[in-house]
Image (cartoon, rainbow, N blue to C red):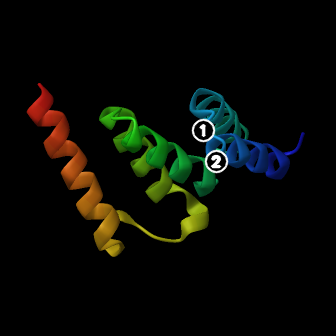
Amino acid sequence: MNLGELIDFAIKNKSEGKIEMAINLFKECANMDPFNPVPHANLYEIYRNIGQLGEARMSLIRFLNAYQTGITIDSVPKAKNDLAELEKQIAEKK
């Protein structure tokens, strides 16, 4: 399976609620191409939704650093706000 097919399969699993499988598939995609933003964006969303804030934070940072996005954290106010909110929530849990 090539990267595009694997991403499509991961998205299908995510949409069907097969979260653990989707996480594993998106991680595999990220390992195949660490600079592809799609797996990181999806992992961010999944981790955020299931309350794994540390993993969500790392996935968001990886997404923002992916070369294909062509952006940095300072140029994306929503992502920057999301990251600040995650860090605040993580600090509150400690």
The amino acid type, in three-letter code, at marker 2 is Ser
Circle 1 SS class: loop
The amino acid type, in three-letter code, at marker 1 is Gly
Q: Which residue is the site of mark 1?
A: 17
Q: In which quarter of the image is the C terminus?
A: top left
- In percent of width and height, residue 89 lies at 17, 41
Residue 39 makes an appearance in the image: yes
Residue 35 makes an appearance in the image: no
- In percent of width and height, residue 3 lies at 80, 47
What is the residue that sits farthest to the front in this orientation? 16
Give the tally of numbered discs: 2
Q: Do the residues labelled 1 and 2 touch (CB within 8 Å)?
A: yes
The image quarter in which residue 88 lies? top left
Q: Which residue is the site of mark 2?
A: 15
Circle 2 SS class: helix
- In percent of width and height, residue 9 lies at 77, 43
- In percent of width and height, residue 68 lies at 61, 65
Above or below, comparing residue 94 to residue 67 in the picture: above
Q: Nearer the viewer, residue 18 or 47?
A: 18
Q: Residues within 10 Å of mark 1 (few under 14, many from 20)?
A: few
Q: What residue is drawn where x is 66% and y is 29%?
A: 21
Q: Nearer the viewer, residue 22 or 85?
A: 22
Q: What residue is drawn where x is 66% and y is 42%?
A: 16
